[in-house]
Amino acid sequence: MGNRRRAPERGRTKPAVIGGMIAVVVGGAGFGVYALYGGGAAADDSSSSSDAKPVKKGPLSATEVKSTATAFLTAWQSGDVTTAAAATNDTAAARTLLTGYGKEAYIKDVTLTAKKRSGDAVPFSVKGTVAYKGGLTKPLAYESELTVVRRAKDGKPLVDWHSKVVHPDLKDGDKLVTGEAGTPPVKALDRDGGELTTAKYPSLGTVLDGLREKFGKTAGGKAGIELRVIRAEAESKDAKGSGSDETPDKTLVELSKGTPGTVRTTLSPGLQATAEQQVAKKAKSSAVVIRPSTGEILAVANAGHGFNTAFQGSLAPGSTMKIITASLLIDKGLASTNKEHPCPKFSTYGGWKFQNDDKFEIKGGTFKASFARSCNTAFISQAKKLSDDDLTKQAQQVFGLGMDNWAIGVPTFDGSVPVQSQAQMAASLLGQGGVRMNPLNMASVVATAKTGTFHQPYLVAPTVDKRTLAKASRSLSSGTQAQLKELLQYTAAAGTAAEAMAGLGPDFGAKTGSAEVDGQKKPNGWFTAWKGDLAAAGVVQQGGHGGETAGPIVAALLKAGS
């Protein structure tokens, strides 16, 4: 936002006490008692309409940010919901959530301590007590943040309202509720019967939440009393069906323990431990291991534990998508493993000029050589011979992707290959454009290439709840599968994946990928591979070339499982 003149900071003072109320403290500097008794953030504006001032515009001053934050936090702390809500730019939503904070969440004795502002943002800490019926109490403490914005119509500074202001785990529309948990706890077990905990496997936090949401009521447990985040989307679940991309409710404080039911998963304790170790070495990395012959998920791990990118990420997969595209070209007779295939420096389609990494070309080379070196133009050159929906159909009908019908036992994103035209269709052939995947999807893709038939990945056996697994409408033809396996084997042995896959052959195959993302200096690095009856995929966001970043992670997992 450019350079800004900052108002001088006042020295450290003790909080002021007026009428029994304590002024909020920010970064050690007293905000004062601005608007404690008035109408919100602008309570000191006593000018008459005849003396109306021009509407303020431009960046907020330090004083405006501090005074607005003080008004909001002080009113919230004192229980004055009306005044607190009036200090925001969404009075109705703020009043609803702040009212529920006391009446539905049963949070009492709230103390809010503001910290040093950062521009227009003011972080603050929250301490309180969850006090439920029957004398059940537990302390509550967490960190949050608010941002002050200027209202366009009158220039008034207000708190930019979002539910996460009240608690960082809330999305807009969610609410906090204390009571008997909607779902009993579950004791999740690995395939060998050992208990899965976040203390042992930090990546499994979201997975365990998902297992509870799905199986808590049917696994034989009894609910306890908890403070929980109740997702807005869950309230319409019955009407819209159990969508695969829902975020589970989340327990924040447990006031009394429930009796857990037991759910056995397909996770391998050894591979899960290795996956945790491997992603810890690379920031923003995620990985999945599955068994191609059955679809069983053996490991899932994310370097960041707040979101399950491995299962729910929606990222362009880059050149790993060429596995699907190659199968399409072979099916249509537009490419054959050992036949000569064009790989020029450039190829134009739909008004876009595509090129290869470092503008390389392969003169007189085969399709196998182009695939192994990840030649973009070898695929773009065939775009004019394809219909706009060919790639979408191949992804759905053969690889089981983009149908939003996977039922693995916890929430997932099942990939997306939308029908596109012109340059965007061509970009989709390279895993860019509108194509979106995650490591679970790409592990499944290479597994399908290995076996010839899509087996929907799953974390909990379908016999547990009698759910139906997704199926693809057709398998790869024997001829296409044989050629696709040869392409992947050659790439693992002598192509862009060779360094990472060294020593893992001969029953192996792999594909690398790099996906450009707007605003990132480095692309996301992808790698997917199989060895024997194991298939794995990984991504390192902003990592660079997949063979150098995600490749070692995937290779280590395949080695550990062999």
Image (tube, grey):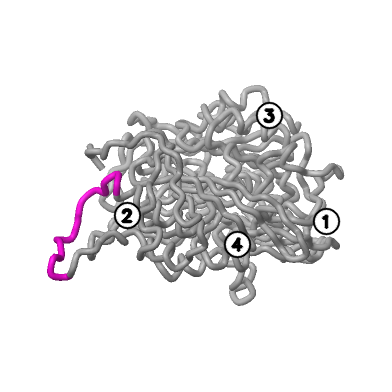
Tell me whether the residue at label 3 lies in contact with that at label 1, contact meaning CB atoms closer than 8 angstroms: no
Helix, strand or loop: magenta stretch:
loop
Q: How far apart are marks 4 and 1 (CA)?
A: 22 Å
Left or right, 557 with respect to 490, comes to right
Examine the image and state in which quarter residue 550 appears.
Answer: top right
70 is higher (above) or lower (below) than 2: below
Residue position for label 4: 176
Q: What amino acid does circle 2 point to?
A: Val
Label 3, on which residue?
506
Q: Which label's residue is closer to the chain start, 3 or 4?
A: 4
Is 50 magenta? The answer is yes
Q: Earlier in the sequence, mark 4 or mark 2?
A: 2
Q: Which amino acid does label 4 sit on?
A: Leu
- The residue lying furthest to the bottom in this view is 239
Give the Cα separation between the discs numbered 3 and 2.
Answer: 60 Å
The Cα atoms of the two marked residues, 3 and 1, are separated by 45 Å
| Upstream in sequence: badge 4 or badge 1 | 4
Mark 2 lies on residue: 149
Q: Residue 379 bears which disc, if any?
A: none
Q: Which mark is on residue 260?
A: 1
Determine if the magenta segment contains residue 354. no
Residue at the spot 64% in from the left edge and 42% down from the top edge: 288
Element at badge 2?
strand
**Is there a contact, CB below 8 Å, between mark 2 and mark 1?**
no
The kind of secondary structure element at disc 4 is: strand
Q: Which of marks 3 and 1 is in front?
A: 1
Q: Can residue 480 be seen in this view?
A: no
Disc number lying in front (3 or 2): 2
On the image, the x and y values in percent for residue 123 come to: 45, 44
